[in-house]
Image (tube, grey):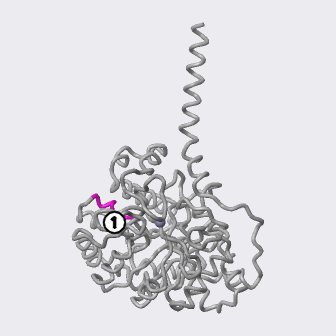
Amino acid sequence: MKTTIRWAGVAIAVLLVAVILMLPGYLERVTNTIVPHEPYEISQAAADLHKELFVADLHSDTLLWHRSVLRRSARGHVDVPRLRDGNVALQVFPAVTKSPSGMNYDQNTGDTDQITQLVIAQRWPIRTWGSLLERALYQSEKLHKAAERYPGELTVVKSADDIVRLLTARVAGEQVVGGLLAIEGLHALEGNVENVQTLYDAGFRMMGLHHFFDNRLGGSLHGVSSAGLTPFGEEVVARMDALNIIIDLAHSSEAVVEDVLKLTRRPVVISHTGVKGACNSARNIDDSLMRRIARRGGLIGIGYWDGAVCDPSPESVVRSIRYAIDLVGADHVALGSDYDGATAVAFDTSEVAVLTEEMLKAGFTQEEIRKVMGDNVALFLSKFLPAS
Ligand SMILES: [Zn+2]
């Protein structure tokens, strides 16, 4: 009897360890998915053109997940080996620090948070369990450590000089990928404006003011208040201006967008979105906002997931890109995949040449393709990142 109980105890312990070890992989496998598909056919013309492009993507939440960016993974959408397969030269990596449960595009409060369970399940350091700032700093450490290990494969981009170095390396045929750190929602400041500097010192160069809920800076596009910038939000934007941190207004309320555009004179980005004119979803931005972002010299990153483009096929992503170019011109349109952002997509980053293929098929000019696929982002960052 005693032996049976002992063996039962061992079996339960083994099972528990197995669950603990397998849980992070399971969580990502069900969250970041790829619609099953046959391999995409890429014409010789598209393959030749794609090989020459500087490809850049404004938004992938890869750092949130339990895997090294350096290793090829069967899960999720982005890692360095797959970025190299896709000839992607620059990837923006935002740090996600808080997401409400039951996330939707209409109304969310900040009362709940799913990221807490995730960071515990993924066995992140205990300092990250109760602190949004520490979660951001930890994700920065992950990227920096990876770049230190294999500098020939990954480099952290922090300045205009770094962009020039990256462009030079790519032109010389080196397959190094530039990673730029961003933040998805400045609740990560934990209400302290001094933490703008803390995050800057940790390498963050682009900051989205909001995620899915209102925070101390003001209203989210998917929050409950629809409010504009608070005095704290104004203080934060001024601090970002002083440090030349790129402002990302994806997920911010319309009133916040208005207020920020009044407050800053710099161009802003909407890193990952769809456009209402091509896909009328609550997540997407309308023509008038697109025009204002473009008039300011900003960038609009088109996403690849269903909420952004309705049907997430490559053709549909390209239709949204076409709509955006027709409305605001090719200089203001970019890629903003939202890979690894709890999204279902039709192709991962290794397959991104399918966009070049579809753009050629749709009659885009080579110049339009070059700009959208990455030249616009390279130019923008070389102009608006801190010089060195
Ligand atoms: Zn997002």
Q: Is residue 102 above or below residue 196?
A: above
Residue lying at 56% horizontally and 15% vertically, measured from the top left: 6
Picture quadrant where residue 135 is located: bottom left
**Relative to residue 116, is residue 77 drawn left or right?**
right
Q: Is residue 56 above or below residue 194?
A: below
Residue lying at 42% horizontally and 85% vertically, measured from the top left: 293
Pick the residue in front: 379 or 329. Answer: 329
Residue 280: percent from left, percent from top: 56, 76
Residue 57: percent from left, percent from top: 53, 74
Q: Is the N terminus in the top left, top right, bottom left or bottom right quadrant?
A: top right
Residue 78: percent from left, percent from top: 58, 63
The furthest residue to the top? 1
Q: Magenta stretch: dominant SS?
A: helix
Picture quadrant where residue 359 is located: bottom right
> SS for tag 1?
loop
Picture quadrant where residue 311 is located: bottom right
Residue 74: percent from left, percent from top: 65, 55
Amino acid type assigned to the residue bearing label 1 in the image: Ser
Pick the residue in front: 1 or 289. Answer: 289
Q: Is residue 71 above or below residue 263?
A: above
Q: Which residue is mark 1?
A: 225
Magenta residue span: 185-190
Q: Is the C terminus in the top left, top right, bottom left or bottom right quadrant?
A: bottom left
**Relative to residue 89, is residue 364 drawn left or right?**
right
Q: Is mark 1 within 8 Å of ligand 1?
A: no
Q: Is-magenta flag for residue 188? A: yes
Q: How many marks?
A: 1
**Relative to residue 375, is residue 318 drawn left or right?**
right
Residue lying at 56% horizontally and 65% vertically, measured from the top left: 339
**Mark 1: few, some, or many residues within 10 Å (few <14, many ≥20)?**
some
Q: Is-magenta flag for residue 269? A: no
